[in-house]
Image (cartoon, rainbow, N blue to C red):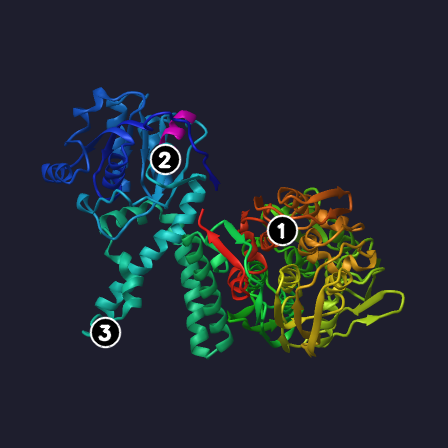
Amino acid sequence: MSSISEPEFSQQPVRKLVVIGLGLIGGSVSAGLRQRHACQEAIGIVRDQVTASLALERGVVDRAYLSLNEVAAELGEGDVIFIAVPTLAVESVLHDIRAQVSAAVTVTDGASVKGSVRDAVIAAFGEVPSNIVLGHPIAGSEQSGVAAANPSLYQKHRVILTPETSTGAQHIARVTAMWQALGAEVLSMSVSEHDEVLGATSHLPHAIAYSLVDTLAHDIGNPNIFRYAAGGFRDFTRIASSDPTMWHDIMRANRGAVLHSLDKFVDNLLRLRDGIEREDGEYLLGVFTRAKAARDHFTRMLAGSTLKDSIALSASKICVKPGAALQNHLRVPGDKSISHRAIMLGSIAQGKTVIDGLLESEDSLATLQAFRDMGVVIDGPANGHVTIYGVGLRGLSAPQKPLYLGNAGTSARLLSGILAAQTFSTTITGDASLSARPMGRIIEPLRAMGASIHSESDNLPLTFSSAKRFSAIDYPLPLASAQVKSCLLLAGLYANGITRVRQTQITRDHTERMLGGFGCPVRSGQDGWLAVTGGTELQGCRVDVPGDFSSAAFFIVAASITPGSDILLEHVGVNPSRTGALDILKLMGANIELLNLGTAGGEPVADIRVRYSELQGITIPTELVSRSIDEFPALFIAAACAQGCTELSGAAELRVKESDRLANMAAGLTALGVNVDIRADGLHITGSPLRGAEVDSAGDHRVAMALALAGLRTDGAVIVNNAECIASSFPDFVTQAKQLGISIEVIDS
């Protein structure tokens, strides 16, 4: 399916509109175009004079006739005929159009089955002429007739066009413009795909609703069956009040696709019946949790929102103004890196894993959904609490569709280590940003282990075929990357023998720590080697996810640069492989204390107290780079507010994160008045007074948050465009920033 671009029409998209069939669908098209002055004249063709009079009385049309031949002779180029009659009546209308109407007139329709309409066109014309554009608006109501016509029916709804290769571009453009004038989003797909999709998502639900009401009304026989029915029954069966004649035609016209969907539904219903009879609680929970997750996702899609709702997601801009000192204490959301790993290991472990503190961000929810798609029963998340019913190393099943990971780079690389060793085939995909990130660094060693991976240019999508032989390897990491290291350790769980990975620089060690917690100790050597034994079964356990240090880093920097600030960030993960940013800030003169040191789920945690201090520019030690790679956007803001120059080198990895963070942070800082010299592997930043400006995140969540917090030290407001990406790691960023006293607002664009 693809979107259709905005057509080029300098005036009204439609000259004369002729609607054949003034029911809900046709009447709403006519009324909507008239209300928006998107046609010069609207003419209705109806079956009886009563309908004609009612349509005129309600302002649905300008003129109404009982036959097409009364208006056919006056139609020409720029005019549109919209066919809105029952599906099985379309062919007779098409014969009338061929006999009476010029081929210059654009003809389209609103039938919900396109295969039968295409057959009707060929029967009437011998081919699909260039002026006929088959289409279907995905909007409606259980009401019918011209009295139900609603000029706003199609606003913010989708319309699917199914043009043939013979269809003229100008006619497609005119129909597209007509629907866009009604406020609809216009998409394109093939006839066969349309009928298959609509058979499952529209025709099947109607068949079920009609059957359910018929069953309750005639087969159960209890006179109180409807009297005590609640809102759920009302909502579910609403569509059974739709026009029976129309749905009689649709079921016959799309017989093949409807039967295919019905067969699948019946099979699943019988399995559900069997699960209830056997009192199989895990199976029932799996059905209900998967269905809830899918339904919630559908609801968010309709609302135009994302996987995780938050105040920062409803708009694409945020504004920060300089203000008072930061004061308060709070707990930042759970660690994203640990959340990903807990989901993955819990899914392939035996038994139940309970997670508390899970980060409910876009990236984490994408990982949850991927494992649900592979048959894992997952209950939650609810306020960070998740229960995973693990299936064991070999218990994953083939997903029915590609696994979509959004912008979750950690998930894509770590999950590849698991998928590479499976006996089924699958594909992982992502958004445009993730699809541009390099995957060759994991593809090469996984192929050396025996994985069958297909990729264009070493980027997503990655397709994994069944691994015939999967063997352990010894692999020295060519670059400091916790994601590559973790990918290979996870793959090593499935390999024959002992997989060894050697790192020359310290990288975050969450995977090693967590594998030990799940019963698979990772051996280490003084020369940097890590080893995991293949075939070691993991055992479910409890995981307490500490606060995300990378998220905390933004507020640590914010308090460090804002005079008078004194904040406390509670229960933050302070794994030494992650806290290089603390060392860098302390070298710059930051006033930071770690209090209440302890452990949570094998990870060191602490409360972090931060007070304002004047910062000094430094040359960042190269040995700290890999331990602070995700925190550099925030550190660049600290450098911009420091006295003197700050020099970073050895950080080329920042070029291939969610964006080129060196280039995009340099561009943002320059717009804010900072003197920045960009190098191949770092930046040279000279601290200076900052000015307010409008900057762009480049779709990178960490760039967005860092540039926003620069507004604490500017002489005016900082507006960050494309800030919705923050949801991928810190959906509550705006709310928590306000709790600390930051003057931050969402701008509805």
For the point 36% across and 35% down, which residue is it?
134
Query: Which residue position holds label 2?
Result: 134
Is there CB contact under 8 Å for labels 3 and 1?
Answer: no
Which residue occupies the foreground of this view, 529 or 697?
697
Task: Say if residue 518 shows up in the picture.
Answer: no
Q: Residues within 10 Å of mark 2 (few under 14, many from 20)?
A: many
N-terminal label among 3 and 1:
3
- Of all residues, the one furthest to the right in this rendering is 527
Q: Secondary structure at mark 3?
A: loop
Query: Which residue position holds label 1?
Result: 703
Which residue occupies the foreground of this view, 113 or 330?
330
Residue 29 location in percent, x, y? 27, 38
Measured in 3D between alpha carbons, the distance from the residue under mark 3 to the one under mark 2, in whole angstroms, is 44 Å
Mark 1: which amino acid? Answer: Val
Residue 135 location in percent, x, y? 36, 38
Task: Say if residue 148 shows up in the picture.
Answer: yes
Measured in 3D between alpha carbons, the distance from the residue under mark 2 to the one under mark 1, in whole angstroms, is 45 Å
